[in-house]
Image: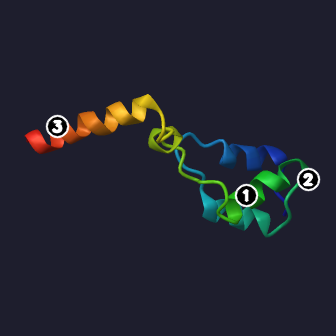
Amino acid sequence: MASTVEEYLEVMNAEVYVDIYKLRDMARHGIPDPVRGEVWKYLLGVQDPNKCMISFIDINSPFFFFLSFFSFLFIDFF
């Protein structure tokens, strides 16, 4: 049975991690046109399924520099 657009969006809008195995099983029965491009990005590995905060940090940002420097101080201190 083909999955609906809402079911695909529910899997892809997960807060932390997109379940690639579930997405792959759903796709075997056909992918609806409105979400086809986004689903293929996940299935081909173009889009990162990990949505935790660290993957959203730009490594060129001042925040990343501060974070890496701060963690360096605490790791060496203890």
Residue 51: percent from the left, percent from the top? Answer: 54, 44
> In the rendered view, does 55 fall on the left or right side of 21?
left
**Do the residues under discs 1 and 3 have CB atoms within 8 angstroms?**
no
Q: CA distance from mark 1 to mark 2?
A: 14 Å
- CA separation, marks 3 and 2? 49 Å
Which residue shows up at 31% across the image and 39% down it? 68
Identify the residue under disc 2.
33
Extreme-left residue of the structure: 78
**Residue marked by disc 1:** 41
Q: Quadrant of residue 44?
A: bottom right
SS of the residue under disc 1: helix
In the rendered view, does 27 fall on the left or right side of 48? Answer: right
Please report contact status of discs 1 and 2: CB closer than 8 Å, yes or no: no
Q: Position of residue 22 (x, y in %)?
A: 65, 61
* Left or right, residue 54 beside residue 56: left
Measure the C-alpha gap from mark 1 to mark 3: 38 Å
In front of the other: 77 or 44: 77
Q: Residue furthest right?
A: 33
Instruction: Classify 10 Å Cα crowding around label 2: few (below 14), some (14-19), many (20 and above).
Output: few
Secondary structure under the numbered disc 2 in the rendered image: helix
Check disc 3: other Cα within 10 Å, few if <14, some if 14-19, many if 20+. Answer: few
What residue is at 51 percent from the left and 39 percent from the top?
58
Location of residue 23 with respect to 4 vertically, above or below: below
Mark 1 crowd level (few <14, some 14–19, many ≥20, 10 Å Cα) = few
Report x, y in % for residue 77.
9, 39
Quick one: SS at disc 3?
helix
Q: Quadrant of the N terminus?
A: bottom right
Specify which label sits upstream in the sequence, 1 or 3: 1
Amino acid type at circle 1 is Lys
Q: Which residue is mark 3?
A: 74
Quadrant of the image containing the C terminus: top left
Residue 6: percent from left, percent from top: 79, 43
